[in-house]
Every structure is written in structure tokens, then in C-alpha cells.
Amino acid sequence: MQETIKYIKSELAPFYEDREVESFVCIILQNICNIGYQEIVLKKVIEVVPEDRKRIRVVVEKLKTSEPIQYIFGEAEFYDLKFNVNNSVLIPRPETEELVDWIINTVSDKKCSILEIGAGSGCISITLKHLLPDSRVSAIDISEDALSVAIENASQNNTKVDFKQMDILKWDEYIWDKYDVIVSNPPYVRESEKARMNANVLDYEPHGALFVSDQDPLLFYKKIADFAIRNLNKNGLLFFEINEAFGPEIKNMLAGKGFVDIILRKDLSGKDRMIKAILK
């Protein structure tokens, strides 16, 4: 096993930081060889069979092209749950876990009705249903492929979420329920920011879930805010994950539409990343 670890590290060292390579070692050996973290740390003598060595080489070569390891193995962790992922959905991120944690710690009525806009893998809505089992959770997405992944994930995590294919930019064409909580992590990366993005995101993750035009970077936030005015219950909560560059602008937009108690919160990296607002 130690020779295999040396091989993975030496091959990936030119492409990734040491800490990330260490993480890859654990993920690869767990998924391919069923070797756990403790066995790796203790440097136990475990033979890696030839067939597994071949599979490891394939994974290493894919990682050299910047393909995300979550897509390679088709799985990602989020809030201690496992989610199927492919390039139809974004890979769940730690800052989104922080948003879910904020919602959980804010919601006082555990039987509330929740809507996620832009479900993707379903990580937000499914996790909320898992943690608030008495709540009624719905989620929408424009992508049929993304919804297929989300439905699989709900089943895998033994949760019941009502998924529907809808375009939130045309929300007034549909019939809606009323909700106590609306949450969204919409497209918020400006097209002009592509040049600064890493290849593992730009080349593999779905652009429709990432990018918005520079001419109207708050497009989805404005549309969802208008939707929330019509479809939130009294004292309903609106939560957004946001582009760190637009925190004050989104706050002002929400205030101008009548939302109150607007809070802009930083993530653990110190970036403006999420907003909560109340509709009185």
C-alpha cells in the first residue's frame, strides 16, 4: 500500500497542493481498495491487488486533467450525507453547508414549509428535510438532468422532497403554494470572472448553474425576491448564497422591495457569502 501512496503523491504533486493530494490519497484508497483513513495513517501492510492498481492509475490520470474527484467517483459529502453528483450538477461546497446550518439554527417552527430554488444535486433541500423531518420541503430546477440526480439523492438519503422542473425567471406562469422559508444558491458568477476560475470548475461543472451576465448580475436575486413577495407567508424567511462582490447591492435591493431585518453574513473564509431577510 505504501508504494501505491507514494505513486499517487508523486504523480499529483506537480498539479495540486500537498494537503489536497493527501485528501485524494484517502478518497482513492477508500473508494477503490476499501482502505480506511486509520489504516493509512498507521501505515498498515495491505496489498493493493493489480486490478486496483490499474483503477488507481486511471483516476490519477483523470485528476491530472483537473477533473474533480467527486465527478470521478460520482459522489460527494455534504453535511455528513452522501450525494450522487455528475457534471449536470454543481459539487456541494462547504460554504453552502454554512448556509444550511444558518437556516437550521434560525427556523423556529420545525413543521415549516420550505422551497429551494435551483435544486441542483438537491443537497440543500434534502439536508433540510433530513434535519427538519416534520417540514414540507419542495425544490425546483430548470434542468431535467439535475432533477434526475436530485430525485436519486432524495431516495438514497431516505427523504421525501417534492421536486419539479420549473424556470424561476418565468415564475408568474406557474401555480405556487405559500412557504415559510425560501432558499436559493442561484447562478451568481459573472461571465467576466471566468478568467480567474480554476480549470476543475470551469471545464467540468455546469455553466448554467454558475454564470450570469455582467449586464445584470443580480438577475436571479431580483426575480426570486419578487417571487418571495408573492409566495412567502407573513414573517417568512428568504435565504441566499451570494457572490461576495455584491453583498451591499443585494441588501439594498431587498430593502427596496420591502424586506426587513436583512443580515449579510461572512463564511468561514471571511467572504460575504449569504444573506437572510424577512418579509413582514
Image (tube, grey):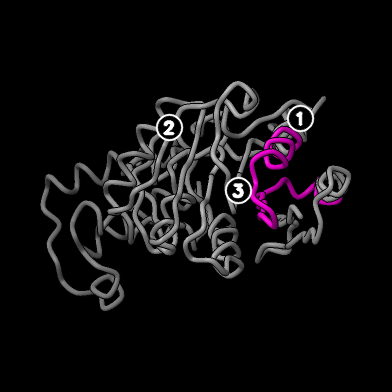
Which element type, helix, strand or loop, lies under badge 3?
strand
The correct choice, above or below, for 220 with respect to 160 in the image is above
Q: Residues within 10 Å of mark 2 (few under 14, many from 20)?
A: many
Q: Which residue is mark 1?
A: 192
Q: Residues within 10 Å of mark 1 (few under 14, many from 20)?
A: few
Total count of labels: 3
Which residue ends up furthest to the bottom in the rendered image?
42
Q: Which residues are magenta?
A: 222-248
Instruction: Select label 2 or label 1 by which is in front.
Output: 2
Side of 96 where 46 appears, left or right: left
Looking at the rendered structure, the kind of residue marked 3 is Ile
How far is mark 3 from mark 2, CA to CA? 19 Å
**Place of residue 224 in the rendered image (x, y in percent of width and height, measured from the top left):** 68, 37
Residue nearest the viewer, comparing 47 with 219: 219
Residue drawn at x 61%, y 67% is: 106
Instruction: Select label 3 or label 2 by which is in front.
Output: 3
**Place of residue 242 in the rendered image (x, y in percent of width and height, measured from the top left):** 70, 47
The correct choice, above or below, for 46 with respect to 211 in the image is below
**Place of residue 68 in the rendered image (x, y in percent of width and height, measured from the top left):** 44, 42
The correct choice, above or below, for 195 with respect to 254 in the image is above
Q: Which residue is mark 3?
A: 182
Which mark, residue 169?
none
Looking at the rendered structure, the kind of residue marked 2 is Ala
Q: Which residue is mark 2?
A: 146
Q: Quadrant of residue 153?
A: top left
Would you say the residues marked 3 and 2 are in contact, meaning their CB atoms lie under 8 Å apart? no
Which element type, helix, strand or loop, lies under badge 2?
helix
Q: Quadrant of residue 85?
A: top left
